[in-house]
Image (tube, grey):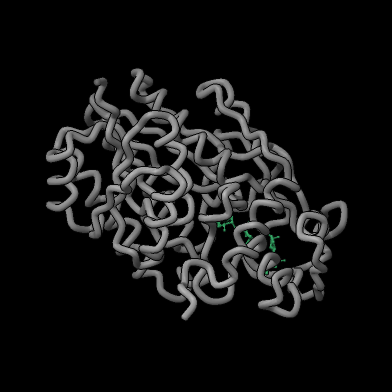
Amino acid sequence: MIRKPIILLTGGAGYIGSHTYVALTEAQFQPLILDDFSNSNPVVLDRLERITGQAVPCHRGSVLNTELVAELLKVHAIEAVVHFAGFKAVGESVAQPLKYFDNNLGGMISLLKAMENAACHTLVFSSSATVYGDPATVPITEDFPRSHTNPYGHTKLVCEDMIAAVCQANAAWRAGVLRYFNPVGAHPSGLIGEDPNGPPNNLMPYVSQVAVGKRPFLHVFGNDYPTPDGTGVRDYIHVQDLAQAHVAALQALLLGDNGFTVNIGTGQGYSVLDVVSAFEQASGKPVPYQLAPRRPGDVARCYADPALARHLLSWSANHTLLSMCEDTWRWQSNNPEGYRLLE
Ligand code: UFG
């Protein structure tokens, strides 16, 4: 029997990690989850087992524990790591920067040390369009200048630089940096999805909680942007497409690609009001909203030029905004309390 390549997913129980787990399993990889469940719920493991029909290997622990990670890499002869583990709330990072520096930068350093120690040199990293700051124009290509407007964004930028430095120092490294735009949606089974703690910071989970009746209305942050309807424009990408991008990145690296930094988006921008009307169509529920002031730090328009990922990885997104909303709605309406088990 041919041995499936074993891939360590740090933060593999989280929103993007769990969807990538399924995609990797279907692509004949053997993913292994490392998660401390600080921002995820162990119930996701049961759901993954139901979707894949197989036991879900998972180790509870922190990526900050370098010895533990090195041990896992060696014992399981892991071929590559996908590093999802990290905090991602912009506002929280402004209030608690050290929490972000400690976890996101400390986690990256710990992981790189463990990988070097175990001679595992193949890495895919979850970066973000946040590294483009306030882009001068759209669509955004990978050679745009990088900047940061909050500690969370700063950690993504510094992690990219740390990866570049280790690749420079040792030619054995192969790293794929994926700059995600706005991940939304859920697995079509409705069994896994995004499960924010408390009021969602992001648009799609907030809209879905309004549609399901958990929140009375959406605040639309600003309607005086220089966009067609005045509301912010973003590149929403279905998490299923995003999961496939990780499969494509790993396949390229394991076939010998030296490494790349690519945008992972659709190339299509939609406004807040576009999302509201698509969600109403998908759910059949009204999504009332009220206009509110701009949210500090928001940019008017942010969408990708995804040509480089198509060229290098033969990957492109193919889900529509309507299917992103339909899958989000299936997850939300089947699991109104997310993974929290109802008494
Ligand atoms: N918005 C609202 N009401 C809400 C939430 C969001 O009107 O309740 C608007 C925002 O103003 C923005 C759009 O919806 O115009 C999208 O906002 P999100 O918070 O969903 O996404 P962002 O583009 O602000 O943030 C995302 C990621 C961050 C990342 C950033 C830049 O969540 O991690 O993209 O890449 F830093």
Q: Nearer the viewer, residue 67 or 150?
A: 67
Query: Which residue appears farthest toward the right when viewing the image?
Result: 229
Q: Relative to residue 96, is residue 2 drawn left or right?
A: left
Please name the residue shown 12% across and 40% down the image.
Answer: 75
Q: Relative to residue 276, is residue 41 drawn left or right?
A: left
- Ligand 1 visible in quadrant: bottom right
Q: Relative to residue 332, is residue 87 drawn left or right?
A: left
**In this rendering, does residue 292 appear at all?**
yes
Give x and y (percent) for residue 261. 47, 33
Dividing the picture into quadrants, the one containing residue 221 is: bottom right
Q: Nearer the viewer, residue 327 or 267?
A: 327
Work out whether 263 lies above or below 159: above
Query: Which residue appears farthest toward the top when viewing the image?
Result: 256
Give x and y (percent) for residue 16. 48, 50
Work out whether 340 lies above or below 226: below
Work out whether 327 lies above or below 122: below
Give x and y (percent) for residue 289. 80, 73
Work out whether 169 lies above or below 300: above
Q: Nearer the viewer, residue 292 or 7?
A: 7
Dividing the picture into quadrants, the one containing residue 136 is: top right
The quadrant the N terminus occupies is top left
Q: How many marks?
A: 0
**In this rendering, does residue 117 appear at all?**
no
Please name the residue shown 46% across and 81% down the image.
Answer: 343
Q: Nearer the viewer, residue 213 or 256?
A: 213
Give x and y (percent) for residue 66. 17, 52
Dividing the picture into quadrants, the one containing residue 60 is: bottom left
Please name the residue shown 65% across and 65% down the image.
Answer: 333
Please name the residue shown 39% across and 50% down the image.
Answer: 49
